[in-house]
Amino acid sequence: NEIYGLVTPQIRAYDAVKMRDIAFQNAIKGGVTTVMITPGSANPIGGQACVVKVKGKVVEEACIKDSCAMKFAFGENPKGVYGSQKKFPSTRMGTAAVIREWLMKAQDYLKRKKNKEFKERDIKLEALIPLIEGKIPVRAHAHQADDIITAYRIAQEFNLDIVFDHCTEGHLIAKELGKWKAKAVVGPTLTGLTKPEVSHKSFETPKVLMDEGCTVAFTTDYPIINIEALNVTAALAVKYGLDENKAIKALTENAAFILGLDKRLGKLESGFDADVVVWDGHPLDTRSKPEYVFIDGDKVFEKK
């Protein structure tokens, strides 16, 4: 979190990725081959996410997309961070206003740029141009139903593609999300009721959303919950009613689709990346572990 910037679209998670971090080995041991890494949720506009494979010594070797999405944050986090500093925004109203202000600035900046009406570039507004042009989506940190609705409202106002991260109360507005053909990355569901906006957290959320036609994937929100528990998250959703095949799809095809990589990742088919995990039991059995992990055809893990 770049917590003293308020609006930081110019920062890139890509510039801080440390491939020697133990997180990548933990991912491999958990059967995860590709990850999205994003700035935190302190700022209303928090910066750019990237997508990398979990192998390689330098991030350039691992990178699939160095800027795949723009992080927005709604709810308790931004208003808490800046309210505690006695700064604007200290309310949900203020957070939404900050986001709108900078999207309007980006629209005006893009018009001026096309008309060649300025001489000096603005790094923040340059970073927002791909979002305004529809080249990357918003990744909206939103737990509460009202925050999810606000995020969608702003996306509609500015014609933005949007993915809802966490979507904790999504089951409370599932029919609306279904009408919007929403993309939601649900989780972390293994945490406790740590703050008011997750008090309605439910293991049934993935099923309820999928039943309404939403595209759903899972997240452990690593390092909040260990990434090795990703299959456990899916297993608990099955325990609470989600079809087993849909749970597997949420871990594979749906995740790739949400990242815009469904022509390359998420299926065992000719022409796709040779990212393969061989389990020693059913992947949704919490006792199961990866026996072999291959990334781009290279064996990166073998169970001893």
Image (cartoon, helix red, strand yellow):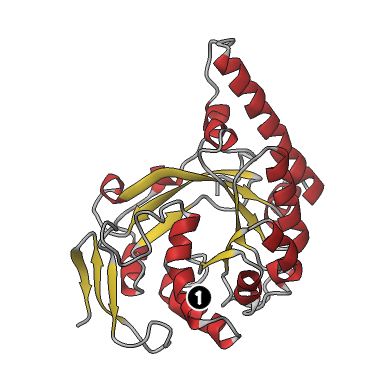
Residue type at mark 1: give it.
Answer: Lys
Which residue is at 41% across, 56% downward?
262
Please tell me how many numbered marks the rendered image carries. 1
Relative image position of residue 19 (x, y in whole percent): 31, 54
The residue lying toward the viewer, choosing from 191 and 168, is 168
Against 21, is 87 above or below?
above
Q: Is residue 280 above or below residue 246?
A: below
Find disc 1 in the rendering and name its residue.
246
Residue shown at 56%/16% (left/top)?
A: 114
Q: Position of residue 145 (x, y in %)?
A: 75, 62
Q: Where 142 falls versus 171 (above or below)? A: above
Residue 86 in view in this figure: no
Quadrant (top left/top right/bottom left/bottom right) for the C terminus: bottom left
Give the x, y percent position of residue 173. 75, 66
Q: Nearer the viewer, residue 213 or 52?
A: 213
| In front of the other: 226 or 296 | 296
Residue 265: quadrant of the picture: bottom left
Left or right of residue 199: residue 164: left
Q: Identify which residue is drawn at 71% across, 43% down.
A: 156
Which residue of the protein is positioned furthest toward the front in this rendering?
270
Crowd tier of the residue under label 1, counting other residues whose Cα lies within 10 Å: few below 14, some 14–19, many 20 or above: many
- Position of residue 301 in the picture relative to residue 255 (left or right): left
Taking the image as drawn, is residue 12 in sight?
A: yes
Secondary structure found at label 1: helix
Q: Position of residue 235 (x, y in %)?
A: 49, 83
